[in-house]
């Protein structure tokens, strides 16, 4: 009798929790937002997942966001699965979430589920509160200009290796009377992975083909597995995401293999058995040496491992997407490309070393990259979850009370394509960056969790773009579909095939 009552209570409790999570809590949040006059729509349990899926299957993944923006304006509520969301591209609300009220927000559970599997949780991307601020204070000086400027020589060397490979292949192919076509997305992913791993791990990686192969293979296949598990929901459902499906076993094995080689590189570096491949200290030297204000506090071995892997993950696909979309935009805008070629030809000299001061002369190149980041933002949206009730103020003066548990989707894509802030927003026009754009241009986000690697990324992209444009012309192979695919980053779903010719 007592055991039956106990079982019934447990079942009722589970049913209540289920109902609360999937129906009651979301309903109260939507009701509250409607009561405040915020437009929006609510489909219980699934939210907008089916609409998003429909747009993705129709190869038009941005269309849903654009339609919702047109229908409701720069802030509205909806939900993703059961989780209620305030979606916004309003600069004032965005500043509220990312800066003024940042203490009331955490990264979304979705992001933790997707990236935590591979990275762990004590790193800049995923840590919260004190751990995050402590790591940020320790690591921010690592990315100062004087440190990353000494990495330019390695960026140049690795880009030059790729250009030499292209030249040789082009020569061979032309001798056979054919054309050279390559998937530029694939090439850029390899180059950015080469650069970031080289700048993190130095010659422990550069000189050991085997180590490099283990890191590259495991990082890329794990990212694919993690992405597939997100799309088919296996990775998102608690308990299910721990079951030993083949993809989970592959991820665990990769994690283990990567762990062993990276730990070895770190241990060797501590014993001075390996060195930086840059002109100065590399990122690993810098995080090993990082000390807090008290000159004593430092990262633990486990944290150093996670941060090093975080740089590799956060730093390669984002920059590779920037490069791929930039070449796409240049191929579609020959006038811009001509002006870029003229700048690069006048600044880069075959016999002179490329230094920070050479790069500072490439102002139009920088504008081209900035405009590409606006038009094809590598990280088009981010999501934060409110962990306390708080008040946000929109640009039109409306005050919005946000309840604990609400997700906020910050939509950089809509912000960067808003006619309110950008003249002819869908046009590729680098000259618009002759002026400064402050709160309306956020490719690297803003506030205490903005991209810590942004100077590194811009420097690297400038080196790659200038050297590539100096040597080659890139034309799009006709007949391909250019469809963006968005998981955390936005990349071309079917690759980006280009015909290469020498300049
Ligand atoms: C074009 C290239 C890049 C773009 C567009 C980009 C964009 C971003 C954005 C939007 C965020 C905020 C994410 C969020 O709040 O959820 C971010 C965070 C971050 N990025 Fe980047 N990123 C780029 C390159 C890099 C590089 C090269 C590195 C490192 C070498 C890097 C390291 C990080 C880290 C560690 C964070 C987390 C910072 C924190 O929360 O304190 N990123 N990035």
Image (spheres, grey):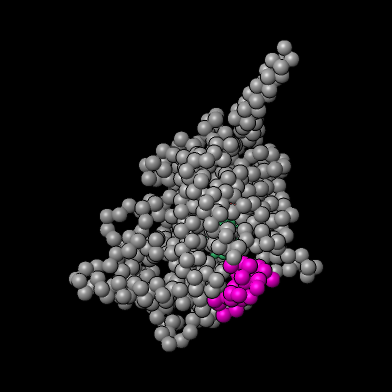
User: At which x and y percent is residue 102?
Assistant: 69, 51
Q: Residue furthest right?
A: 294
Relative image position of residue 321 (x, y in whole percent): 45, 60
In the rendered view, tell whether residue 285 sits above or below residue 136.
Answer: below
User: Is residue 149 depicted above or below 132 in this figure?
Assistant: below
Of the pair 422 and 327, the residue shown nearer to us = 327
Image quarter of the C terminus? bottom left
Residue at the (45%, 37%) spot, across then down = 51
Queried whether the magenta region covers residue 283, the answer comes back as yes
Say whether residue 101 is visible: yes
* Residue at the spot 48% in from the left edge and 84% down from the top edge: 353
Q: Which residues are magenta?
A: 265-289
User: Outermost residue toward the bottom?
Assistant: 351
300 vs 360: above or below:
above
> Does residue 454 show up magenta in the picture?
no
Q: Quadrant of residue 430?
A: bottom left
Q: Which residue is located at x 64 percent, y 33 percent?
A: 29
| Residue 189 screen position, x and y as percent | 44, 62
| Residue at the extreme left of the image, as rendered | 177
Question: Residue 220 or 4: which is nearer the viewer?
Answer: 4
**Residue 317 in picture, x, y percent from top left:** 48, 59
- The N terminus lies in which quarter of the figure? top right
The number of callouts visible is: 0
Give the image quarter of residue 141.
Answer: bottom right
Residue displayed at 52% across by 34% down: 47
Is any atom of residue 430 visible in this view? Answer: no
Q: In which quarter of the view is residue 83 placed?
A: top right
Quarter, ligand 1? bottom right
Q: Is residue 340 left or right of residue 299?
A: left
């Amino acid at each position: 009798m007592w055991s039956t009552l106990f079982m019934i209570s447990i079942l009722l409790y589970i049913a209540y929790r289920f109902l609360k999570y999937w129906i009651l809590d979301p309903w109260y949040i939507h009701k509250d937002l409607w009561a405040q006059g915020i437009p929006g729509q609510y489909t219980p349990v699934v939210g907008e997942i089916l609409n998003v899926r429909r747009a993705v299957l129709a190869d038009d993944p941005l269309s849903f966001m654009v339609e919702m923006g047109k229908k409701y304006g720069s802030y509205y509520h909806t939900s993703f699965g059961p989780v209620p969301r305030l979606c916004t591209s309003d600069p004032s609300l965005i500043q509220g979430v990312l800066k003024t009220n940042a203490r009331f927000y955490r990264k979304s559970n979705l992001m933790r589920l997707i990236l935590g599997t591979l990275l762990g949780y004590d790193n800049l991307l995923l840590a919260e509160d004190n751990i995050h601020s402590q790591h940020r204070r320790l690591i921010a000086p690592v990315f100062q200009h004087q440190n990353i400027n000494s990495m330019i020589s390695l960026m140049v060397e690795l880009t030059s290796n790729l250009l030499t490979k292209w030249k040789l292949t082009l020569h061979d192919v032309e001798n056979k009377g054919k054309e050279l076509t390559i998937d530029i997305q694939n090439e850029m992913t390899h180059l950015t992975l080469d650069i970031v791993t080289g700048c993190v791990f130095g010659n422990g990686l550069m000189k050991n083909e085997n180590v490099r192969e283990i890191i590259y293979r495991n990082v890329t296949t794990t990212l694919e597995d993690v992405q597939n598990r997100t799309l088919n929901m296996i990775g998102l459902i608690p308990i299910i995401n721990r079951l030993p499906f083949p993809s989970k076993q592959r991820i665990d094995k990769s994690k283990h293999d990567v762990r062993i080689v990276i730990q070895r590189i770190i241990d060797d570096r501590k014993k001075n058995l390996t060195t930086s491949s840059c002109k100065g200290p590399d990122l690993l030297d810098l995080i090993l040496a990082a000390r807090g204000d008290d000159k004593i506090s430092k990262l633990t071995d486990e944290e150093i491992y996670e941060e090093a892997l975080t740089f590799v993950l956060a730093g390669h696909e984002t920059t590779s997407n920037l490069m791929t979309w930039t070449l796409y935009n240049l191929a579609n805008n020959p006038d811009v490309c001509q002006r870029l070629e003229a700048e690069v030809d006048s600044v880069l000299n075959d016999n002179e070393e490329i230094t920070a001061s050479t790069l500072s002369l490439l102002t139009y190149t920088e504008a081209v990259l900035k405009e590409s980041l606006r038009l094809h933002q590598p990280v088009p949206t981010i999501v934060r979850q409110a962990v306390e009730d708080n008040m946000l103020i929109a640009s039109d003066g409306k005050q919005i009370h946000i309840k604990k548990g609400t997700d906020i989707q910050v939509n950089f894509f809509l912000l960067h394509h808003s006619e309110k802030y950008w003249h002819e927003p869908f046009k590729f026009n680098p000259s618009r960056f002759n002026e400064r754009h402050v709160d309306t241009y956020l490719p690297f986000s803003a506030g205490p969790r903005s991209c810590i690697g942004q100077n590194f990324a811009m420097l690297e992209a400038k080196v790659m773009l200038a050297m590539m444009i100096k040597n080659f012309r890139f034309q799009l192979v006709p007949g391909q579909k250019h469809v963006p695919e968005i998981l955390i980053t936005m990349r071309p779903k079917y690759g980006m095939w280009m015909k290469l010719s020498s300049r």
